[in-house]
Image (tube, rainbow, N blue to C red):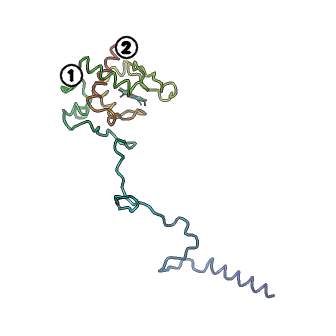
Amino acid sequence: MRWFFLILTLFAVMLAVGYGARGTKFSKPPFELFPDMDRQYKVKYQKPSEFFEDGSGARRPVVGTIPMGYQAPLNKKDTPVGSEYYRSGLFGDFYGDGFPEEVKVDAALLDHGRRRFQIYCTPCHGESGNGQGVVAKYWLIPPTANLVDPRVKALPDGQIFWTITHGKGLMGPYSGAVPIADRWAITAYVRALQGASGN
Ligand code: HEC
């Protein structure tokens, strides 16, 4: 009988604990046996943080890196000089054609463009620009663009420059790695490849 009352009392206590305080408002936070992850250290936007030495919660990008999705970062070699066309490849909302006054197309420029092209573009577009670079062996869908295709040949110079600056589809932007002058040199070299292709 003693056990019966003991179990009954225990049961009553459990019931009271389970249902007792439901819906009631308290002015003090409840006692937490297991705090789980209710409160954790986190950085709120625009708020300071003690975690970092400089006391700032927001972090600056590491020098020389480009955050993903960040469009057309300025190259540190580029100064804000030159015409709008030279800097963007655009006239207003339209791609320009021809090379800007700042760019002198000669053998030296083409040679420079060739070397830059071989560093930055050949892995995907191939040495001759036909889209059969090493990447094409492993990367099939979607295919890398064939730069000597008549379609790309028909694109205005400004669009080639713009594509190198901002990227297109799976091709990333090269404005951070390749300064403006080099991008025009590469554009000139792409034109030379197209001319040599016979397409
Ligand atoms: C990581 C691989 C990769 C690299 C490196 C790369 N590209 Fe591309 N490029 C692509 C792909 C993929 C496309 C097709 C994009 C699409 O049409 O969606 C493309 C497309 C193009 C086009 C065609 C754009 C059009 O409108 O059809 C041009 C021009 C071009 N790239 C130039 C360059 C130049 C110049 C470089 C070197 C600075 C370069 N690419 C570096 C992958 C690459």
- Residue located beneath label 1 in the image: 104
Q: Position of residue 155 (x, y in %)?
A: 32, 23
Residue 36's place in the image compared with 102, above or below, is below
Q: Residue furthest right?
A: 1
Which residue is located at x 32 percent, y 35 percent?
A: 175
Q: Earlier in the sequence, mark 2 or mark 1?
A: 1
Q: Residue furthest top?
A: 198
Q: Residues within 10 Å of mark 2 (few under 14, many from 20)?
A: some
Q: Is mark 1 within 8 Å of ligand 1?
A: no
- Residue located beneath label 2 in the image: 197
Which residue is located at x 19 percent, y 35 percent?
A: 81
Element assignment for label 1: loop
Quadrant of the frame with the C terminus? top left
* Residue type highlighted by circle 1: Lys
Q: Position of residue 185 (x, y in %)?
A: 28, 24
> Foreground residue, 133 or 198?
133
